[in-house]
Amino acid sequence: MLKVEHIGIAVQSLDEMIPFYEKLLNTPCYKTEVVESEKVNTAFFQKGTTKIELLESISEDGVIAKFLEKKGEGIHHIAFEVEDIESEMKRLSDEGFQLLQTVPKEGADNKLVCFLHPKSTKGVLIELCMERK
Ligand code: ZN
């Protein structure tokens, strides 16, 4: 793992939270992007080499809708950038961590991603991400 690439935060409404985070971080949102496969709309902010990813559900039965229902707004996941996502997935799987994907899938912001099951990471949802080439 190279670094924390971004922190994912679940929010009810991007329309409300983009201006809120622009004020908080004193940085403009540089991009929004819908990820259909995850049923989310995302918004990104950059601070140094780390990003904040806001996640809004675009469906009542999506993962973010379920998260908000259970826990409310707040930190959803921590994403680590990796050099080679497939070898990192194999390493973690060999170490006994449970992966939520068997092959990397397309994430927001031009990334290939894989999540680790929070049951195998003591309650923290971890994302591996690698820049698509
Ligand atoms: Zn993420």
Image: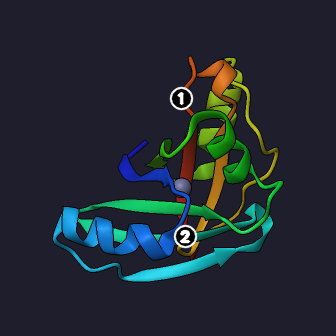
Q: What residue type is labelled 2?
A: Thr
Q: Nearer the viewer, mark 2 or mark 1?
A: 2
- Residue 52 horizontal side relative to residue 113, left or right: left
Quadrant where the image shows the N terminus = top left
How many residues crowd mark 1 within 10 Å: few (<14), some (14–19), many (20+)?
some
Residue 78 % position (x, y): 46, 43
Q: In this view, does 113 lie above or below 95?
A: below
Q: Mark 2 points at which residue?
A: 42
Judged from the image, the quadrant occupied by ligand 1 is bottom right
Q: Is residue 60 above or below residue 34?
A: above
Residue for point 60% across, 51% down: 85
Q: Quadrant of residue 67?
A: top right
Quadrant where the image shows the C terminus = bottom right
Ligand 1 within 8 Å of the CB at mark 1? no
Residue 84 % position (x, y): 56, 53
Residue for point 75% across, 65% down: 39
Q: Name the residue under label 1.
A: 124
**Badge 2 or badge 1: first in the primary sequence:** 2
Q: Which amino acid does label 1 sit on?
A: Val
19 or 55: nearer the eye? 19
